[in-house]
Image: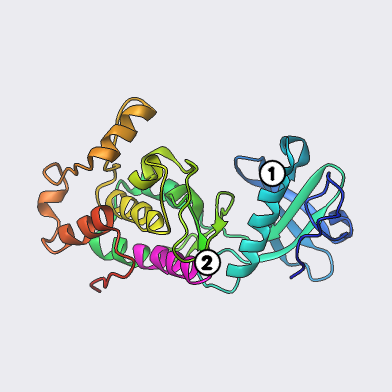
Amino acid sequence: MEKPNPRRPSNTVLPYQTPRLRDHYLLGKKLGQGQFGTTYLCTEKSASANYACKPIPKRKLVCREDYEDVWREIQIMHHLSEHPNVVRIKGTYEDSVFVHIVMEVCEGGVLFDRIVSKGHFSEREAVKLIKMILGVVEACHSLGVMHRDLKPENFLFDSPKEDAKLKATDFGLSVFYKPGQYLYDVVGSPYYVAPEVLKKCYGPEIDVWSAGVILYILLSGVPPFWAETESGIFRQILQGKLDFKSDPWPIIYKNKRPLVVTYTRSCYCFVFLPD
């Protein structure tokens, strides 16, 4: 992969020129809505293969740092692209208005929507899903990437089937890091952010915390830390008190409680899950 060129124009994201997206793809229906805009179905003209296209409006990139953030996201997606639980990037295209990220299309919908639809998952289903999520975390950390925004909204199913594969899709807040390095900026999503982030001194263990929060939600259907306001949620996170008395926890098999506590309290990076 090409490295950023410090002499590239200040209004470009990519350090190289690209052909026009529409010379190679036909844009189709809307697939979803994200932070930077709408994701569309696109069809490669030469092979009639379908992909997802995420156009990032350059008008929303207000400073040079924003441009560098998008370029970093693209680099990270390339780094992780061969992992079976990461959406594979196909290519990137840039014009005067947009940066287009073309990637694998996942037709099974968002994990968050499936949680809402089901209420909560069985223990067996939750273990299967969290194994895939932890596989993404392990891959990120082995390549020196901290995700920093793990949540159900950032995972897609590759098909509508019940046994569909789960794939991570959004790396907009992800960063490269070195072993022993600490970060200090507060990023992430309120329900899933780790206490170390709120204390403004953290490492890759914050991704394991977020995975633990997702596991709690998969099993119970509700977040472990909740309040009416964002500041209230943060207070709950810093206090770290978990509810294992409300339904459905009393009927969940006893060996699952230590599993959740291990994730959300100790943040160990390697945990063996029961089948």
Per the picture, the main secondary structure of the magenta-coloured stretch is: helix
Q: For the residues marked 1 and 2, what is the alpha-carbon distance in whole angstroms?
A: 20 Å
Who's the residue at 32% across and 33% down the image?
233
Q: Is residue 65 left or right of residue 97?
A: left
**Between 56 and 185, which is closer to the camera in this rendering?**
185
Q: Is residue 11 left or right of residue 274?
A: right
Question: Can residue 205 be found in the magenta stretch?
Answer: no
Question: Mark 2 packing: few (<14 Cα in 10 Å), some, or many (20+)?
Answer: some
Q: Which residue lies under the disc numbered 1?
A: 65
**Between 79 and 257, which is closer to the camera in this rendering?**
79
Question: Can residue 138 be found in the magenta stretch?
Answer: yes
Who's the residue at 88% across and 59% down the image?
17
Q: Which residue lies under the disc numbered 2?
A: 144
Q: Amino acid at mark 1?
A: Glu
Question: Mark 1 packing: few (<14 Cα in 10 Å), some, or many (20+)?
Answer: few
Which segment is the magenta one?
Answer: 130-143
Q: Secondary structure at mark 1?
A: helix
Who's the residue at 73% across and 67% down the image?
49
**Between 106 and 100, which is closer to the camera in this rendering?**
100
